[in-house]
Image: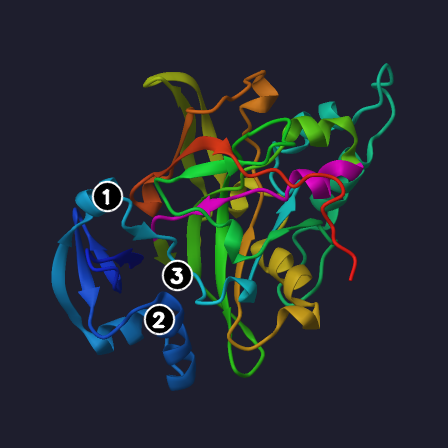
Amino acid sequence: MRLVQFELGNGERRVGVVEGNTLREVQGAHSVRELALGAIKAGTGLVQQVQGLGLGDSHDYAALLAELKILPPLDHPDPAHMLISGTGLTHLGSASARDKMHQQAGDDSAMTDTMRIFKWGVEGGKPAAGQAGVQPEWFYKGDGSIVVRPGAAFAVPPFAEDAGEEPEIGGLYVIGHDRKPYRLGFAVGNEFSDHVMERKNYLYLAHSKLRSCSYGPELRVGELPQHLAGSSRILRNGEEIWRNEFLSGEANMCHSLENLEYHHFKYSQFLKPGDVHIHFFGTATLSFADGIRTQPGDVFEISQAEFGAPLINGIGSSDAAFEPGQVTPL
């Protein structure tokens, strides 16, 4: 089952089940979070919760996408109660580009911290079920205010040095009233980042991740396929300027999903009832690694057939600048 959140012409929210080119409303549901919390309370699964409510009106999916009426497939009415985070160096092809960025100038022989963490992941990222493996790289991206709906453009901070895509799969979670995390499923994501800033020094990784992101348009309920092969491409003035294969799923990763989830939710501050978590699992495909430099007006398109409609976002204008000296003492 694949779920979508969308807006009607009057601004009211609905949840839809994808049936080809049509969205069928889930009767009485106004958010996927609401559906999930209802399923947790009832002790049932998300699919069963949807089936119990039943399906109603049909809507033209393509028209809603074109009108930018499709919302991220999971959100929270208070963006401060959403945590967007991610893990890096999790995919088998992910280390080479990062290592090139982080090598000391003129010293290709030294093992960088990037390669060291990647090596640890290869050796200990897939422990036996129920056991903790090696910790992955982890980063904070922002709260729900940074999320851009499918089809919309990313705002770029005036201090940004790059506006680069990162095609990834994200896990979508709700924290139950029992303080346990519940995974609703997965979505395709664009974990938009600043690779020029990160390349200066790997300690700038935290700064480089504080950018917008997008995921969806569809939530795939259930388990993640072991092997996923999609594509990531960039369009400029309607012409494709770059394309590459995008591989994911545990068969292409050096960490298990269980291990990545454990090392996120082991922190008690991430277990606040009702909160929403979007956690990106990493990528091995970057246009930046191929020498591409994006510019305003470029369009990203990330496709995985198992996730339905592609995720499309553009690069918009800069945010308003926050100038030095604007902090006011009281």
Residue type pointed to by label 1: Glu
Q: Which badge, 1 or 3, comes first in the chain's sequence?
A: 1
Q: Work out which quarter of the rendered image holds the C terminus and state it.
A: bottom right
Res. 128 visible in picture: no
Q: How many marks?
A: 3
Q: Which badge, 1 or 2, comes first in the chain's sequence?
A: 2
Q: Which mark is residue 67?
A: 1
Q: Which mark is residue 222?
A: 3
Q: Which circle, 1 or 3, is nearer the viewer? A: 1
Q: Rounded to the nearest whole Å, what is the CA distance between mark 3 and mark 2?
A: 9 Å
**Residue 188, position in %: x, y?**
43, 45
Q: Identify which residue is drawn at 37% across, 56% down.
A: 73
Residue 64 vs residue 23, the one in the foreground: 64
Query: How many other residues sit within 10 Å of disc 2, few (<14), some (14-19) or many (≥20)?
Result: many
In the displayed structure, 106 sits above or below 258; it is: above
Q: Identify which residue is drawn at 65% across, 41% down.
A: 322
Q: Which badge, 3 or 2, comes first in the chain's sequence?
A: 2
SS for tag 3?
loop
Residue type pointed to by label 3: Gly
**Residue 155, position in %: x, y?**
50, 37
Residue that carries the numbered disc 2 in the rendered image: 46
Q: Rounded to the nearest whole Å, what is the CA distance between mark 1 and mark 3?
A: 29 Å
Residue type pointed to by label 2: Leu
Residue 282 vs residue 273, the one in the foreground: 273
User: Which range is magenta?
Assistant: 203-218
Query: How many other residues sit within 10 Å of disc 1, few (<14), some (14-19) or many (≥20)?
Result: few
